[in-house]
Image (spheres, rainbow, N blue to C red):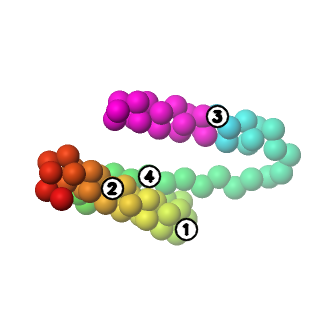
């Protein structure tokens, strides 16, 4: 079950990447590209980005995914 979920998420992210790339190449407007990243050292996230908004978005996404990860681990080991 988890294998198909993982593969589905990878395919979905690649699809979003290519759609964004096509829209960027086709668009006539001048666009501003922003980016960022997250490095996890243990459970501690180190977040960086080109703007404050990107950093906040990545921090919220990282904390949400960490929470989901911990809840799934607790369910797998039957602690809740």
Residue 80 sits above or below residue 25 on the image: below
Discs 2/4, front: 2
Discs 2/1, front: 2
Region of the chain picked out in magenta, as a range: 1-17
Going from N to C along the chain, the mark reached first, 2 or 1, is: 1
Dot 2 alpha-carbon crowd within 10 angstroms: few under 14, some 14 to 19, many 20 or more: few
Q: Residue at x 14, y 48 (%)?
A: 77
Discs 3/2, front: 2
Q: Residue at x 54, y 53 (%)?
A: 35
Q: Do the residues bearing badges 3 and 4 touch, measured as CB atoms within 8 Å?
A: no
Q: What element carries label 4?
A: strand
Q: Residue at x 61, y 40 (%)?
A: 16
Q: Residue 53 carries which label?
A: 1
Residue 77 sits above or below residue 79 on the image: above
Secondary structure character of the magenta stretch overall: helix
Query: Residue tagged by mark 3?
Result: 18
x then y, percent, for residue 13: 53, 38
Q: Measure how far apart labels 2 and 1 are at the Cα level.
A: 23 Å
Q: What element carries label 1?
A: helix
Q: Is mark 3 on a helix, strand or loop?
A: helix
Q: Do the residues bearing badges 4 and 1 touch, measured as CB atoms within 8 Å?
A: no
Q: Nearer the viewer, residue 22 or 3?
A: 3
Going from N to C along the chain, the mark reached first, 2 or 4, is: 4
Q: Which image quarter is the C terminus in?
A: bottom left
Q: Which image quarter is the N terminus in?
A: top left
Discs 3/1, front: 3
Query: Residue tagged by mark 2?
Result: 68
x then y, percent, for residue 28: 86, 46
Q: Which mark is residue 37?
A: 4
Q: What element carries label 2?
A: helix
Q: Measure how far apart labels 3 and 1 are at the Cα level.
A: 23 Å
Going from N to C along the chain, the mark reached first, 3 or 4, is: 3
């Amino acid at each position: 079950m988890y294998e198909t979920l993982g593969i589905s998420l990878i395919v979905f992210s690649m699809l979003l990447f290519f759609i964004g790339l096509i829209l960027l190449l086709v668009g006539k407007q001048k666009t501003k590209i922003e980016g960022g990243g997250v490095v996890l050292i243990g459970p501690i996230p180190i977040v960086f980005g080109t703007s404050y908004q990107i950093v906040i978005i990545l921090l919220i996404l990282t904390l949400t995914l960490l929470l989901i990860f911990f809840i799934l681990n607790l369910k797998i080991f039957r602690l809740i």
